Image (cartoon, grey):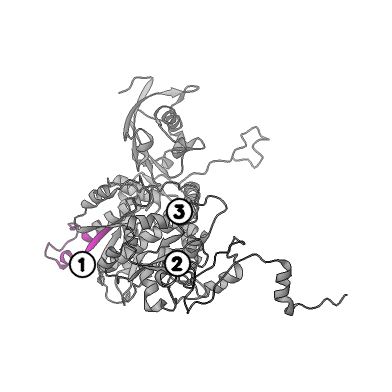
Amino acid sequence: MASENTLKVKIEFGGGLELLFDNKRIYDLELPATFEDDQPSNVDFLIRYMRDKLLKERVELFMEKDTIRPGILVLINDTDWELEGEKDYALKDGDEIVFISTLHGG
Amino acid sequence: MSSCGAPAAEGGEALMQKRQKYDKSKNCVRCKDNIGNIVVRHAVYCKNCFSPMIAAKFRRGVEPYVNEAPKGRRRLKASGNILVGLSGGVGSTVILDLVNQSYFAPRTDTPGGKEHPRFNERIWQKGFVCYVDISAVFPNMRDRTNEVRNAAKTYDALEFILVRLENAFDDSWWTSVGGKPSNSELFVDFADQDLLITAISDSNTDPVAALRTFISALPTQTAISQAIPTLVRVLLLYTARHLGVSHVLLGTSLTSLSISLISSISQGGGFTVREESDEQWMAPGSTTPIRIIKPLQDVGMKECSAWAWWHGLPVVQKEKLPGTGQDIAALTKDFIVGLEKDYPSTVSTIAKTCAKLAPKHGSVRRCLLCERPIQEGIDDWLTRTSIRSLSIGNTTPRFSTARLTPSLCYSCHTTLTSKSSRGATKSTSSFVRLPVWLSAGLQSAEYSMFQIPDERDQPAEKTSAKDTEVWQTRKIGQQEMKHAIGDFLIEDSGQ
């Protein structure tokens, strides 16, 4: 369990996306519970955190125009992020976020 | 109550309201009870309903094509075996799983006991998984054969078959799949629009070297991205014929299909647009066709990825070709994938619209490279409408009259000859060995009207008695041109 000011989030990669993140499939992150202007940390904050702290190469393969690149499926606790408000989803302690690249064809 | 005024004038933000990605509620549209897990083209499905929905779409894509006479007996029985093309990508991984689950894995969920005929009678007697390794195309490409083989091992009811892309230039492979061995290897000059052919006996070219020469002689990066899937497809088809296969299943998803449709049309493949989604291939000399089915053509890449993730399937991933990214196929892919994110139904519309297209005239011949139908009269049409050569000062005499051009469809001809003002590949050789099936096709009775000169009979200095006409392209002056057409000019009356 994280402290009051932090929250623990597990992120996982699929479809080859782990290659951009040091070839590591799972990360357990401890993130601040709030960011800028005391807003609760959300997925927007998480992806910027991933870009700045975890991404090892070629940001354009992960992000496009400040969001996740088209062709990457995001599951928040096994649910499509489109059902959870995408970038605006407020992270909760123990959340599991999966990023799957769908770009490797048929 | 909402206002119709301009938001900026009313002090609000002048931003368009973000459209919700799903219709109605977050509940599953099928069971109506569970909270949804995935949005599929604006419709919400829970995990429990998602898998049966995909499996049903898959079966709907396969079963109408199983029996030779679709309106005959109700029981499904194919005339041959089944072959699944496995590339290591998500679509083919999903389709392999679905084929195994639906038609090969022992079923325990249906009544009738273990001795019931439904457990003993398969629709296809044998199943094969075929992987075409393309790692020999360029040096330093990773060979993923072992990873793919391990992924396929899970499905022990289906036999793993390995084919390598260089087999397209390998006579021993060609003979092993029932091809007729040719007396001489045929080479073609890619630098010439007519693709003049020369035969060389006993050249013993190494298949890998021949493949690399073929690829490096292609004029553009787009041509490389187009030629490799063509070679893979035809290798799969000849392998299927040898294995007594009646149905080849490919994991082309709705997204991949839309990409290949747009990409193919933009590269001159409009005549065979139907074959992109539904194709029957008749092997030379055969009487029964092989049906190429793409049962995931109503299932997007997103759904395929979700299926693979939720079923724990090992997706090996396809090896990326070096240098790709700015070719037509890659640019089309970027466009369609971006479109799918915001307008997923439009991607489906592309496939559905293309499915309604049909060529105005039929075809009586097939292209010897891609084995798809050729538009009739293509050569005449090209002569009338296209600039056939960009180099005016070419004075190289042509010593061969055997042309490959009439045996190719417009798309393949464009792939082999269409040069770009930028992004051209560096060719190391202009004479390139032809794939084995193309050589065999040219030497067959059907194409015997194209005389193929043998290099030994035809030294560079002279032509054979048969081919006395020597073509030469040179720049001529205005006076000479006027003289040539002088008899047809109408004299100026002075008015």
Reading the image, the residue beneath label 2 is B274
Q: Which mark is residue B125?
A: 1
Provide the chain ID for the residue under circle 2: B
Which region is colored magenta? B101-130
Q: Secondary structure at mark 2?
A: helix
Provide the chain ID for the residue under circle 1: B
Work out whether residue B91 can be spotted.
yes
Query: Label 3 vs label 1: CA separation?
Result: 47 Å
Marks 3 and 2: in contact by CB < 8 Å?
A: no
Reading the image, the residue beneath label 3 is B428
Q: Is residue B54 left or right of residue B102?
A: right
Query: Label 2 vs label 3: CA separation?
Result: 36 Å
Amino acid on which disc 1 is placed: Gln
Amino acid on which disc 2 is placed: Arg
How many numbered circles does the render carry? 3
Count residues near mark 2 (Cα–Cα under 10 Å), then give few for <14, some for 14-19, many for 20+: some
Q: Is residue B461 above or below residue B21?
A: below
Nearest to N terminus: mark 3 or mark 1 = 1
